[in-house]
Amino acid sequence: MARPYWSGQIQISLVAFGVQLFPAIEAKSEIRFHEVSRKSGERVRHQKVTESEAADSEAAPVEKDDIVKGYEYSKGQFVYIEPEEIKELRAAARQTVQIEQFIGMDELDPALLEKPYFVTPQNDSQAEAFAVVRKALKETGKAGLGRIAASGRERLIAICAPQDDKLAGMMAYVLRYPEELRSAQEYFAGIKTPAVDDDQLSLAKELIKRKTGKFDPGKFKDEYEIALRELIDSKIQRTPMPKEQEPARPKVVNLMDALRRSVSETSQKKPVARVGVDETKAGTGKSKLKLVKPHAKAPARRKTA
């Protein structure tokens, strides 16, 4: 089990109980690259040196204890911030998440979601209050909003019950602040908005309806990772890379023609297979957006001979 990312208390008015937050995601890529000299075949090492010593190949690297955070308030002028000074900021907030308000789960904008965490009681003595709050959140469909201080920053956090009734823990989602998001209007302002033809709209809705299925995250896999592994294996074994056949695409004259053909070629019972989707597994999730759900381990990746 991973080490807790954060330990402290969740406080709702006068109710408080100790919890631990564990990262809910991990890097699954099995391929790691190193920087290597093309000439010598040796690994390239990087050292930290000052700007004035960067051009000197014999300059000694800067020791870790001599490196401090600096804020450049004027060109070449810095104020130093010591690690201990950062730790003292918001000392109380580091230990307690004060729930400031509750919101409906449907109010959480997916664009604000940053990282998911599993929430567990710190120990058995905290289990009663934990269970009561968890069930209340589940039955009301609410999430509690608070602030958490970790890794030198204060972040907004949403705490809620997981979708799966069989899971006894809670979920926490670190949220981005709205000012961290770029303005959508800046990017969408130049998009033309022509009138939508009713027949085209009807066909588009029918296409969506026929290709709608239950969401099963386990059906999706990292095709790039698989292709990268095949490339590496082919180089190690000195065999040619298998060539993929591009699927033949019918020529379409206009949007209406494309919609008609798409609908006619799509079975209502079984969606058309897509790249990166394993059609051998049946979907088990729900079609609506879910914030997180633990997955079973992905099957081992095959290697090419």
Image (cartoon, grey):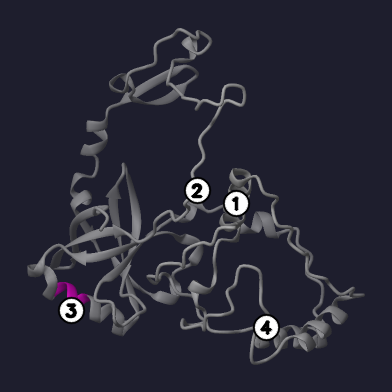
Crowd tier of the residue under label 3, counting other residues whose Cα lies within 10 Å: few below 14, some 14–19, many 20 or above: few
* Residue that mark 4 sits on: 208
* Residue that mark 3 sits on: 132
Is 163 left, or right, of 240 in this rendering?
Answer: left
Span highlighted in magenta in the image = 129-133
Q: Amino acid at mark 3?
A: Val
Question: Residue 77, how many percent across, how many down?
Answer: 43, 17
Real-space Cα distance between discs 1 and 2? 8 Å
Q: Residue at horizontal 24%, vertical 54%?
A: 4
Q: Residue at horizontal 46%, vertical 7%?
A: 58
Crowd tier of the residue under label 1, counting other residues whose Cα lies within 10 Å: few below 14, some 14–19, many 20 or above: few
* Residue 159 occupies quadrant: bottom left
Question: Residue 135, how many percent across, how many down?
Answer: 24, 81
In this view, the mark in front (3 or 1): 1
Q: Are marks 1 and 2 in contact (CB under 8 Å)?
A: yes
* Residue that mark 2 sits on: 31
Q: Residue at horizontal 58%, vertical 49%?
A: 233
Depth check, front residue: 4 or 195: 4
| Lower sequence index among marks 1 and 4 | 4
In this view, the mark in front (4 or 2): 2
Numbered label attached to residue 228: 1
Real-space Cα distance between discs 1 and 4? 32 Å
| Lower sequence index among marks 2 and 3 | 2
